[in-house]
Amino acid sequence: MSAEAKTFRFVVRGKSDRLDRYLAAHLSDYSRSEIQRWIKEGMVLVNGHRAKAGMSLREGDVISGVIPRPSATELTPEDIPLVILYEDEDVLAIDKPAGMVVHPAAGHSRGTLVNAILYHFPRLEGVGEGGRPGIVHRLDKDTSGIILVAKNARAHRHLQSQFRQRTIEKTYLALLHGHITPKEGLIDAPIGRDPRHRKRMAVVPSERGREAQTEYAVVAFYGMTSLVKAHPRTGRTHQIRVHFASVGYPIVGDVVYGRRDVYKLGRHFLHAHRLRFRRPSDERMIELISPLPEALQDLLDLLS
């Protein structure tokens, strides 16, 4: 089982940017590291010639390339149970557990959400980009909660457009170390690859990062922690985790950007709790809620 390879072509308009950063902004289903690998392997051309990831683009440059199709092992259906929060002829909404990777990648070829989707919904294999049947956005491995999946190409384009236009409303629940002040605010700080730790993201100067904004409001204080609702206006990799850590209030259980796991959660306390989107078939607004997983609720009960 394997999806067909996809091609792309862009003509650069406006101010210059690095090649890898430009493609990451225009191919939002793929990480910058994936795109850099394609460039290194010669699958991306600028004006018909091979280029380097850091190449500075100019107005009128033509970028073309091939998105490699995933290997068959990456698309193996697996009988993994799924919790379906909502389903119609166009859309699935799945309540993803913490610990599940969304799509196959190096070190995670089995046990992913994609493997489960292909077992329960085999017709979705050809929807969207290769290796991501129907997937239109992501959640980190240890982030639980709502994730949308398109069931056909028309719905995939419609949902992707809503994400690009930032009309989909996402609300996360996060537990932070400390009592965050002010109780409501907007963290507006660009995010890019951490120059010291290339597998991590960080708040970086604007010329090296991408715009990132996270609104938040305190729900309650539990001991020396803050439960907040977070509304990401943008969708950068690890955005909520990086933003709260950058202002001195890292997410509980986040050993990458915060502190050691003092409450023995085995995950970070970040949950995609609420999501509102327009249904592709008729533009009706759909609102979905995913309750806090038992382990997160138990911690709140303990702290209170």
Image (cartoon, helix red, strand yellow):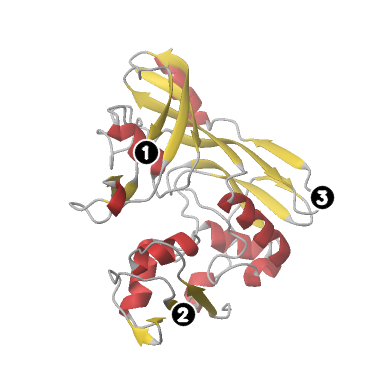
In the picture provided, is 282 more to the left or to the right than 230? right
Q: Position of residue 200 (x, y in %)?
A: 28, 50
Q: Which mark is residue 289?
A: none
Residue at left offset 25%, top offset 33%? 259
Q: Position of residue 72 (x, y in %)?
A: 51, 78
Decide: few, some or many residues near mark 3? Use Cα within 10 Å; few <14, some 14-19, many ≥20: few
In the picture provided, is 85 more to the left or to the right than 175? right
- Foreground label between 1 and 2: 2
In the picture provided, is 55 more to the left or to the right than 115? left
Q: Is residue 264 visible?
A: yes
Q: For the residue marked with disc 2, what is the amino acid? A: Ser
Q: Is residue 107 visible?
A: no
- Foreground label between 2 and 3: 2
Residue to which mark 1 is pinned: 241
Decide: few, some or many residues near mark 1? Use Cα within 10 Å; few <14, some 14-19, many ≥20: many
Please tell me which of labels 2 and 3 falls first in the chain: 2
Which part of the image, by quadrant, shows the N terminus?
bottom right
Residue to which mark 3 is pinned: 282
> What is the C-alpha distance between the residues marked 1 and 2?
34 Å
Q: How many marks?
A: 3
Please tell me which of labels 3 and 1 falls first in the chain: 1
Q: For the residue marked with disc 1, what is the amino acid? A: Arg
> What is the C-alpha distance between the residues marked 3 and 1?
35 Å
Residue at left offset 43%, top offset 66%? 23
Residue 21, by quadrant, is bottom left
Residue to which mark 2 is pinned: 64
Q: Nearer the viewer, residue 115 or 217?
A: 217
| Direction bottom: furthest residue | 48
Label 1 element class: helix
| Direction right: furthest residue | 282
Q: Nearer the viewer, residue 69 or 182?
A: 182
Decide: few, some or many residues near mark 2? Use Cα within 10 Å; few <14, some 14-19, many ≥20: some
